[in-house]
């Protein structure tokens, strides 16, 4: 294992380090930049500001790898509260939610995860919005796609997420191209047997998958901050006769906000992935641990706010 990744994971589980990081002025700046806050009200406020700037939003209540039912239940209730508030303040048309199945009980069984995700989907429908199922490491891909298929029996608009660095993804994209799909590069540490490890190969597969999605009848959502990929997707969308309303770009909260607004000003649909909740420390550390190269990425983001 990469020594830097080992250190980051060790820090993630160390309460003393957490207290130091949580109280350091620079750390608080990082958290405020990349996490909307700890409460539902914080998340709704952040969503309102983004929507006011012409952006759309998907909100993620932080937490994953849940191993007990009470924690899974608290996560579901957090989403239900969030959806109620999005509806009450009139944001539901522009704000959906993203749900990790591991946060709602996948480790305890697919049936529990499906039941809990169904409750969130039903609440989203009542609020006037929808849900996207986040994808996690490759060991959960098949289970996530099975739950997705069951959810779509009742809620066809539920979004899928596929990761371009997985070798299987081009086949999965072909299966799901007629539906709502978020395509991302992927950020988990995966073995070469299941994932491309060369960044160039990941980019090539991303473009292959993007072509399939743009040629299909579904609604593609391209999650990337890479300017070159954004340009290529725009060109391929025009080639396939896609209008700017027929697909969207997605970016993380706090990352390249100037580019988010620039693309929106050009008429593109841009959706911002907004994490919130008390588990912000683990969220940031896990993102760094998944790919230690992200350390430099986040540091650069602090220096450049565009």
Image: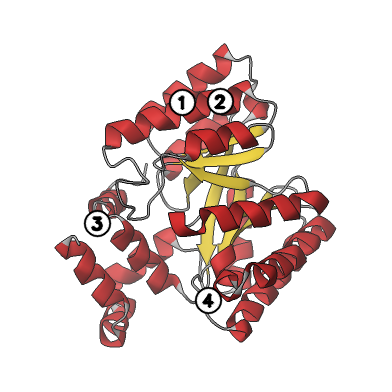
Tell me, for residue 208, which label it has, or none: 1
Percent position of residue 73, x then y: 66, 79
**Residue 173 image offset from top left, x and y in percent:** 56, 35
User: Mark 3 or 4 closer to N-term?
Assistant: 4
Q: Residue at x 65, y 54 (%)?
A: 146
Expressed as whole percent of the image width and height from the top left, the position of residue 21 reads 29, 76
Mark 4 secondary-structure assignment: loop
Label 2's element?
Answer: helix
Residue at (34% x, 78% y) in the render: 22
Which of disc 3 and disc 2 is earlier in sequence?
2
Q: Is residue 258 above or below residue 38?
A: above
The answer to whether any part of residue 130 appears in the image is: no
Q: Is residue 138 visible?
A: yes
Position of the C terminus by quadrant: top left
In 3D space, how far apart are the residues under numbered discs 3 and 1 (Cα atoms)?
A: 26 Å
Mark closer to the chain start, 3 or 1 = 1
Residue pointed to by mark 2: 212
Name the side, left or right, on which 141 lies relative to 70: left
Contact flag, marks 2 and 1 (Cβ < 8 Å): yes
Q: Quadrant of the N terminus?
A: bottom left
How crowded is the residue under tag 3: few (<14 C-alpha within 10 Å), some, or many (20+)? many
């Amino acid at each position: 294992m990469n020594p830097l990744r080992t250190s980051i994971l060790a820090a993630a589980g160390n309460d003393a380090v957490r207290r130091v990081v949580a109280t350091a002025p620079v750390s608080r700046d990082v958290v405020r930049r990349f996490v909307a806050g700890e409460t539902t009200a914080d998340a709704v406020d952040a969503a309102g500001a983004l929507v006011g700037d012409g952006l759309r939003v998907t909100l993620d209540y932080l937490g994953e790898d849940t191993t007990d039912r009470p924690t899974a239940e608290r996560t579901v209730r957090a989403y239900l509260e969030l959806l109620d508030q999005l509806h009450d303040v009139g944001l539901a048309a522009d704000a959906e939610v993203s749900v990790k199945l591991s946060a709602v009980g996948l480790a305890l069984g697919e049936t529990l995860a499906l039941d809990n995700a169904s409750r969130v989907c039903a609440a989203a429908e009542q609020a006037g919005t929808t849900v996207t199922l986040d994808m996690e490491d490759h060991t959960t891909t098949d289970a996530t796609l099975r739950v997705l298929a069951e959810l779509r029996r009742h809620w066809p608009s539920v979004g899928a997420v596929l990761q371009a660095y997985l070798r299987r993804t081009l086949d999965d994209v072909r299966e799901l191209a007629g539906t709502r799909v978020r395509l991302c590069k992927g950020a988990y540490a995966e073995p070469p047997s299941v994932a491309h490890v060369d960044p160039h190969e990941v980019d090539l597969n991303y473009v292959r998958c993007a072509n399939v999605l743009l040629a299909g009848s579904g609604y593609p959502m391209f999650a990337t901050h890479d300017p070159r990929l954004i340009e290529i997707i725009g060109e391929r969308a025009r080639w396939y006769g896609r209008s700017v309303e027929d697909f969207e770009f997605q970016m993380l909260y706090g990352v390249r906000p100037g580019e988010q607004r620039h693309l929106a000003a050009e008429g593109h649909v841009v959706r911002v992935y907004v994490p919130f909740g008390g588990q912000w420390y683990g969220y940031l550390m896990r993102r760094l641990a998944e790919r230690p190269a992200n350390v430099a990425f986040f540091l650069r983001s602090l220096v450049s706010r565009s």
